[in-house]
Image (cartoon, rainbow, N blue to C red):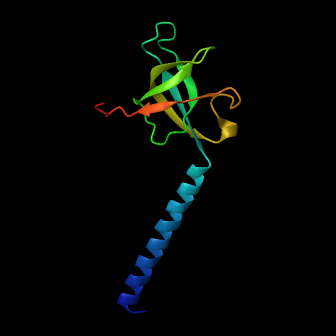
C-alpha cells in the first residue's frame, strides 16, 4: 500500500466508525424516556421537595421552568427542573402508571 491509499482507507474507516457510533447512540437514546425532578419553589406547601415527571418535550435541562400538574387535583403550576434522568420505562424513577407529564417547557436562558 502506498501512503495515499493508506490515508484514504483511514479516513474512510474513521467516517464509518463515527457514523455507526452516532447511529448506535441515537438508537440507544430512542429507547430511553426523559424523566425530570421538579421543584415548585412558589408553593409554600411543597417548597423544597422534588416531584418526578415524564417529559415528552425534547431539550429539558436543569434550571428550565416547566408547567406541570401538581397534587390530587392536578392543578397546573410553574416549577423548576432540578434533575434530568434518561431511563427505560421499566427503570423509571416513579411508577409509569402513576407518573404525570410535563405540560410545557420554558428554557432557562429564554428572555420571554
The residue under the point 48% across, 19% down is 77
The residue under the point 42% across, 13% down is 42
Q: Is residue 94 above or below residue 25?
A: above
Q: Is residue 25 above or below residue 66?
A: below
Quadrant position of residue 78: top left
Residue furthest to the bottom: 2
Residue furthest to the top: 45
> Quarter holding the N terminus?
bottom left
The residue under the point 66% across, 37% down is 91
Q: Is residue 34 left or right of residue 47?
A: right
Q: Is residue 66 left or right of residue 26?
A: left
Image location of residue 17, percent across then percent down = 49, 69
Q: Nearer the viewer, residue 52 or 18?
A: 52
> Quarter holding the C terminus?
top left
Quadrant position of residue 5: bottom left
The residue under the point 51% across, 7% down is 45
Image location of residue 27, percent across then percent down = 58, 56
Q: Is residue 74 left or right of residue 65?
A: right
Q: Nearer the viewer, residue 69 or 20?
A: 69
Q: How many marks?
A: 0
Image location of residue 66, percent across then percent down = 45, 27
Image location of residue 103, percent across then percent down = 52, 30
Quadrant position of residue 75: top right
Amino acid at each position: 500500500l502506498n501512503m495515499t491509499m493508506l490515508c484514504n482507507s483511514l479516513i474512510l474507516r474513521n467516517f464509518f466508525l463515527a457514523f455507526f457510533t452516532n447511529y448506535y447512540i441515537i438508537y440507544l437514546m430512542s429507547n430511553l424516556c426523559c424523566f425530570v425532578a421538579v421543584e415548585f419553589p412558589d408553593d409554600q406547601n411543597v417548597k423544597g421537595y422534588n416531584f418526578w415527571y415524564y417529559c415528552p418535550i425534547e431539550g429539558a435541562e436543569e434550571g428550565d421552568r416547566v408547567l406541570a400538574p401538581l397534587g390530587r387535583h392536578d392543578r397546573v403550576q410553574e416549577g423548576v427542573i432540578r434533575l434530568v434522568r434518561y431511563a427505560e420505562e421499566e427503570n423509571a424513577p416513579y411508577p409509569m402508571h402513576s407518573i404525570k407529564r410535563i405540560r410545557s417547557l420554558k428554557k432557562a436562558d429564554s428572555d420571554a
